[in-house]
Image (cartoon, rainbow, N blue to C red):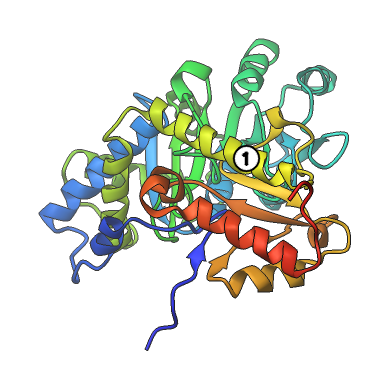
Amino acid sequence: MAAPHKLCMIPGPVEFHQDVLDAMATKATSHIDPNFIKTFGESLVMLKQVLMCKNGQPFIISGSGTLGWDMVAANLVEPSETALVVNTGLFGDRFGECIETYGGKVTHLHADAIGLAPTLESIAQAIKAAPTPFKIVTITHVDTSTGVLTDIKSIARLVKEASPSTLVIVDAVCSAGAEEIDMDGWGIDVVLTASQKALGTPPGLALLVASERAMQVFQARKSPPSSYFGSFAKWVPIMQAYMANKPSYFATPAVQLIISLHTSLRQILSRPLAERFEQHIKVSDDVKKVVTSWGLKLVPGSHALAAHTLTAVYYPEGVTAQGVLSSIAGKGVIIAGGLHPKIAPTYMRIGHMGLSVTAENEHNYVKTTLAALEAALRENGYTIPNQ
């Protein structure tokens, strides 16, 4: 007998729509079944639509979002080429580490403090100070460890003006499907993400879209890709075949996951994306208004820097992570503790993306979570002001 389900309100995996779960339960299906070929091809096209990229090359591959880092590093950065990491937290650190693993030379541009983002001026200075143009600039759109939202539109424009040959790479694992991303309109060369967050599909798929320019850079490599499984050379023919409604094979795709992703992408695209983004902004603003009214402090240094897919908030003085997290779990809700190693014990993270936002009026996921958190804080000795 399965244990009772606790509401999953961490910053991914998120709660999944029942139709997505039903699609996941498809019986054994060949990866070259005509129906699956059609489903896979449509999923690749819909991924481009979500990221607003008309002519780019999409990839849907078995793996976590981390595989996207490997694919960028192995295919777009040759040994000793340089990368600038616009760093807003732990996932900037790790992206940089991944690039170094493949032989790239990394410069990290950190914010002045945890909860802030590097300024446009500091990015421009870093680009100007580089002895040769950076091959890539990487940006974590939403760093899940800090809850910081980075202005990828302005950074992409700056990079294009200051260093036209440099590729702009966006880690959108915790933003794609919830925060606006316009690859074509903003001049972004690669967006990488994963299935289990705002795209509303169980974990296990790495998703990436590369612009035509990025693919031209790949094709002009002097050395072969430094990954076998993650090589664009291996995967491009597979993806193009599925989009042409033809079977192909390099490694077996996660058939049931792709079928469930197809269901979720259809739901996402069933209404204007702008409405979905605005809905995430509204719910995020509501959550942050409530927790700050309780006297709690957000990890992001300002409202403008705060992501709309999660809320990272410090515990009040005298209240511990263990006390709050165990208390709220006892009420049937799971939220996440801190992740950034320098401040991990001092803050918590509440996810609000995908179904927990779009179905809030029906299921009250966020209201239930806030009620449980309020009760947990009281149980742990915190007096909420003015109540």
Residue 137 or 131: which is nearer the viewer?
137
In percent of width and height, residue 350 lies at: 61, 53
Q: Is residue 105 above or below residue 180?
A: below
Which residue: 40% across, 53% down? 61
Q: Secondary structure at mark 1?
A: strand
Which residue: 65% across, 30% down? 136
Question: Looking at the image, can residue 103 be seen?
Answer: no
Residue 102 or 331: which is nearer the viewer?
331
User: Quadrant of the image for the N terminus?
Assistant: bottom left
Residue 1 or 174: which is nearer the viewer?
1
In percent of width and height, residue 29 lies at: 18, 66
Q: Amino acid at mark 1?
A: Val
Q: Is residue 260 left or right of residue 335?
A: left
Question: Looking at the image, can residue 317 be seen?
Answer: yes
Q: Which residue is mark 1?
A: 142
Sort mark 1 into few (<14), some (14-19) or many (20+) by Cα contacts within 10 Å.
Answer: many
In percent of width and height, residue 39 lies at: 20, 48
Q: Is residue 77 left or right of residue 127?
A: left
Residue 338 or 288: which is nearer the viewer?
288
Q: Quadrant of residue 89?
A: top right
